[in-house]
Image (cartoon, rainbow, N blue to C red):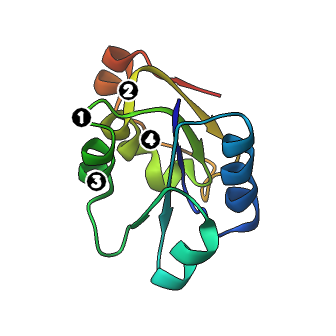
Amino acid sequence: QSVLVSGGAGAVGHYAIQMARLMGARQVITTVSSADKAAHAGADHAINYREEDVAERVRELTGGRGVDRVVEVDLAANGTLLPKVIRQDGICACYGSGKADVTLPFGPMIVSGAAIR
């Protein structure tokens, strides 16, 4: 499966990348904020969210399909990105949010069949 790990240079994100590899992910993509963090993260592909359109780059890297799984560090900040990067019936494992209240684009999420855990 293909996996997108947000914040791959952080402690949990870095371990999530390693676990995805150990579990046999065919492609591990991460988001980072600098070239140094990209080098540290250790994913197959690192997307600098300050310089690139994350959704566009994920679609490019996955042949337009999107990723099977997302490991999310901040659902409040990145929730609107989910339906743009996750493939049909994909799953997002969320372990954090910068805010208690999260707004998600209901229509695109329901159509995609994506689940958030």
Q: Which mark sits nearer the N-terminus, 3 or 2?
A: 3
Q: Secondary structure at mark 4?
A: loop
- The residue pinned by badge 3 equals 57
Amino acid at circle 1: Gly
Amino acid at circle 4: Thr
Q: Which mark sits nearer the N-terminus, 3 or 4?
A: 3
Q: Disc 4, disc 2: CB below 8 Å?
A: no
Which of the numbered marks, if any, corresponds to residue 64? Answer: 1
In the depicted view, which residue is nearer to us: 67 or 74?
A: 67
Q: Find the distance from the CA under tag 3 to the CA under tag 2.
A: 14 Å
Residue occupying the far bottom of the picture = 36
Q: Which mark sits nearer the N-terminus, 1 or 3?
A: 3
Which one is in front in this view, the residue at disc 3 or the one at disc 4? 3
Which of the numbered marks, if any, corresponds to residue 84? Answer: none
Up/down of 1 relative to 94, above or below: above
- The residue pinned by badge 2 equals 87
Amino acid at circle 3: Arg
* Residue at (30% x, 38% y) in the render: 84
Q: Is residue 42 left or right of residue 27?
A: right
